[in-house]
Amino acid sequence: MSIGSSNHQPSGSPSDSPSDSIDITPLSDPGRRRHARTARRAFGPRRIRNTALTAALALVALGSLPALVHLVPEDNSQAVAQAPAAPAAAPLAPQTSQEAVDLGDGTTLAAWELVGDQKVFTLTLAPKKHTTTDGMIKDGLSVNGTIPAPTIRVNEGDKLKLIVDNKMKEGSAIHWHGMDLPNEQDGVPGITQRTIRPGTQHIYEWTAISTGTHWYHSHMGGDQEGRGVFGALIVVPAVNDIPSDRDYTLIFSDGALGFVINGKSFPSTTRLAARVGERVRIRLIGAGPEMIHSVHLHLGFFEVVAQDGNRLPQPFKADTQLLGVGQTFDIVWVPTRTGAWMLHCHIFSHSETSAGMTGMVTLVDVAEANPVTVPHVPGVGDTEAARPAGRIDFESGV
Ligand SMILES: [Cu+2]
């Protein structure tokens, strides 16, 4: 499965099942049974087998039940010719809301609702006792109850309304990092807006025109950011997105929460799932207020394909990517072997103590590649022995 560029839906956790089997759903439809009975009377059992086969194949091609009406022909050889042209696929109904969804990498997709022509997000900032790993409880700041803040994922050109509701005991403002937007929407307290006082709201309105992987965070000094007010801000380009089978986001932070990936310290970080041969896109975000991180992935190399949301004109291969404060990189990794492959900051004081690995460490669990599935064509076997019983032998006509 490839994740398309116009995908509105969360894409971090594609199904592990091949799900390539062809489902001829209308088989149990009473209308079809009626047609089948009529046809059986008219043509006898052998002819109906042929007709049913042809109808099944045509159904697969057309993917629509109404077409079946045209597929009980007097002469089976005319079936495909008589079938009407496949109707144009109906346009998808516009999405009008999105629920919060666990994206499978330790981040959560932000909920929104379409009001008029705007996608409306409500972001509630509040204190939270946050556990980074067993026994490590920190005084964090959450957005909609989560650390990191929920991932805002929108499409290029979307008009956004972002209601920031400050339920913290301190003032704040939210900066939309990497966005090309009007100055008064930039979220810098004392410069472009008044501080959002405790117990009050502030509304930001802007259009998402800066595509790729970005982020948002409190601009009230680095302290709030270090305690958790940071999240991914992904603007899916209308065309030419980076194709991938998996799409994960890893946000590195190093403030009051300690050395964390997506708000967690190893071994409580979320392990990522992948399969051999898949294109695994990982969006790296340096959201810590203080430090650079040297992000290393075991097993070969990955390709660095974008920086700060912009596709690189010349992607390059690396096994370690330096992630500066405020930077983002998109990397694409195609695992070649199964196993538990480590992704960690290679600055060992950020990822290890004398007691072992901790902090900025996670693992990618790579399973075997999906088997190649060959479509089954009913009635046709490579050898006579391979033909299932009851199937028609086209050569002999028996
Ligand atoms: Cu580091």
Image: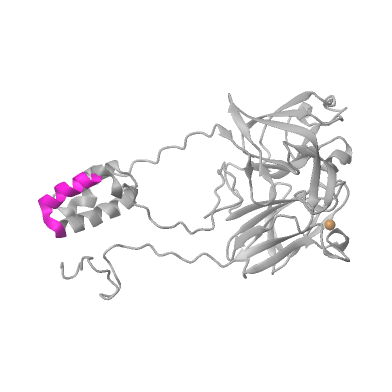
- Ligand 1 resides in the quarter of the picture at bottom right
In magenta, the rendered stretch is: 32-46
Looking at the picture, how far across and down is residue 222, in whole percent?
A: 87, 41
In the image, residue 39 lies in the stretch drawn in magenta: yes
In the image, residue 117 lies in the stretch drawn in magenta: no
Residue at 87 percent across and 47 percent down: it is 255
Question: In which quadrant of the rendered image does the C terminus lie?
Answer: bottom left
| Above or below, 189 relative to 44 | above
94 relative to 395 in the view: left or right = right
Looking at the picture, how far across and down is residue 43, in whole percent?
A: 12, 53
Looking at the picture, how far across and down is residue 122, in whole percent?
A: 69, 30
**Along the viewing direction, whichever of 281 and 197 lies nearer the viewer:** 197
Q: In which image quadrant can residue 90 be found? A: top left
161 relative to 54 in the view: left or right = right
Q: Residue furthest front?
A: 135
- Which SS type dominates the magenta stretch? helix
Q: In which image quadrant can residue 51 be found? A: bottom left
397 relative to 360 in the view: left or right = left
Tell me if residue 73 can be seen: no
Residue at 44 percent across and 37 percent down: it is 91
Q: How many callouts does the rendering have?
A: 0
**Along the viewing direction, whichever of 392 and 210 lies nearer the viewer:** 392
